[in-house]
Amino acid sequence: MTPPRDFSLRLAPSFVDGVLLAAGAIADATLVYCGAACIDERAFTTLMRHDLAQTLVAQGDATRLVTTFTDFSVAPMGTAHVVEETARKVLQRRQPGVLILAELSRVTLAGEDLRGTCEALREILPVPVVAATSRSLVRDAGDALASILAGLARVIPASAFAGGPVPERV
């Protein structure tokens, strides 16, 4: 007998939505999404529904969303080198306050370890790097927000809070 299906998750914003909204809310963050070009379309529709003044998706070099164009057929061969190369290219064009790494479920299923890639990049890049990951494939926007906020809490030094908040900076 087939188990009953739980359709409740369809009503909740997805993990991708949560990553996009969190990255969009951090004015000096750049989001590197390990996935195909469909992320660009998803970002536009998600952010236009929730934040009309968003600056994550913009034209040309002004965009803070960068995709690696990695699809599920390439992911089993490893994506760490593609993410690292993309992150380096981003840093040649701009100096973000934080670099957020995320991946589509297909890449997660292929066995890529985005957390390991994130830790390796922290050692070689001059900006804080945070991985938006979840060990579960049944995840939603809350899981994405929790992952990013916990990552920020780990990488932002206490000295950054001296003197109070600085608008528009992580």
Image (cartoon, helix red, strand yellow):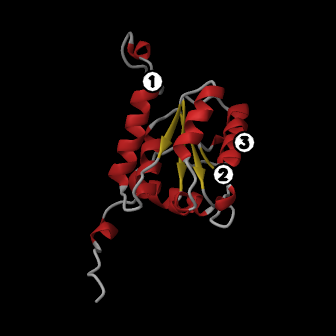
- Amino acid type, mark 3: Glu
- Amino acid type, mark 1: Ile
Check disc 3 and report its element: helix, strand or loop.
helix
Name the residue tied to disc 2: 79
Q: CA distance from mark 3 to mark 1?
A: 23 Å
Camera-nearest residue between 35 and 13: 35
Q: Who's the residue at 43% across and 31% down the image?
A: 152
Image position, residue 16 (x, y; %): 46, 56
Q: Residues within 10 Å of mark 2 (few under 14, many from 20)?
A: many
- Amino acid type, mark 2: Thr
Q: Mark on residue 167?
A: none
Q: Nearer the viewer, mark 3 or mark 2?
A: 2
Q: Nearer the viewer, mark 1 or mark 2?
A: 2
In the picture as drawn, the residue positioned furthest to the bottom comes out as 1
Q: Mark on residue 85?
A: 3
12 sits left or right of 124 in the view = left
Q: Who's the residue at 38% across and 10% down the image?
A: 163
The quarter holding residue 39 reads: bottom right
Image position, residue 70 (x, y; %): 66, 58
Q: CA distance from mark 3 to mark 2?
A: 10 Å
Name the residue tied to disc 1: 156
* Residues at discs 3 and 1 in contact (Cβ within 8 Å): no
Q: CA distance from mark 1 to mark 2?
A: 26 Å
86 sits left or right of 170 in the view = right
Q: Is residue 56 visible from the viewing direction of this image?
A: no
Check disc 2 and report its element: helix, strand or loop.
loop
* Residues at discs 3 and 2 in contact (Cβ within 8 Å): no
Check disc 1 and report its element: helix, strand or loop.
loop
Camera-nearest residue between 40 and 114: 114
